[in-house]
Image: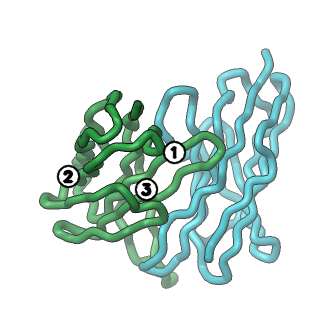
Chain colours: A green, B cyan
Amino acid sequence: NAGVTQTPKFRVLKTGQSMTLLCAQDMNHEYMYWYRQDPGMGLRLIHYSVGEGTTAKGEVPDGYNVSRLKKQNFLLGLESAAPSQTSVYFCASSLQVMATSGGYQETQYFGPGTRLLVL
Amino acid sequence: AQSVSQHNHHVILSEAASLELGCNYSYGGTVNLFWYVQYPGQHLQLLLKYFSGDPLVKGIKGFEAEFIKSKFSFNLRKPSVQWSDTAEYFCAVKGGGSQGNLIFGKGTKLSVKP
């Protein structure tokens, strides 16, 4: 049981190049997320998915696209990389359960991150 | 909109000192509350979480947090820190409904001097 894995671990791109980051989870979680982490900014949500075939925008979606063709995989694409996209990217997955007391409970589990440098 | 505020950007302590990191959030309804820790060069790991019930929750490595609903706070505590606790700590909040995203604070960097 590997949990959440991310590929690649590190990448250098030139401005204008494209790339795809892969996130995979083996916990059968419905929900998956892509975040970026920048110094002093915490984590900001880029896009997320509540199930296979569905995606939605988060707080900072511009310049990124995502796809969730299989339940276990969530891909993050950069069509034309910019220096402002230099960041560490984290994927997370979760299962949302209804609490007996009402409401929903959800814990996100994070992957190891992908460090991206755009020159 | 929901927001999470962590009061301290950088905390420096000596080993054996007590730790309290502040976290306040703005959200009026039921919440899921979390503290994550990120050791240097590593990914986020769940330290502890609160969904409901006893407002004092215990996590891994001797950490605990107290949910005070009236103050919209979820402060993290540890009675005696170790050098190995040097890391960045993130408070995060999610509304208890089925919708809504996990909102992170900007993080508090903890440096423990041996």
x, y (%) of residue A47?
36, 62
Q: Quadrant of the rendered structure where residue B6 is?
A: bottom right
The residue labelled by disc 3 is A108
The residue labelled by disc 1 is A37
- Where, quadrant-wise, is the C terminus of chain B in this rendering? top right
Tell me if B89 is positioned left or right of B73 in this view. left
Is residue B70 visible from the viewing direction of this image?
Answer: yes
Task: Say if labels 1 and 3 share a chain.
Answer: yes
Q: Disc 2 to disc 1, how far (Cα)?
A: 21 Å
Q: Nearer the viewer, residue B65 or A117?
A: A117
Residue ID at (62%, 77%): B1
Q: Quadrant of the rendered structure where residue A1 is?
A: top left
Residue ID at (21%, 59%): A67
The residue labelled by disc 2 is A73
Q: How would you rate the neighbour count of disc 3 (Cα within 10 Å): few for under 14, some for 14-19, many for 20 or more? A: many
Q: Which amino acid is tagged 3? A: Gln
Q: Give the mark, 2 or 1, whose residue is nearer the N terminus.
A: 1
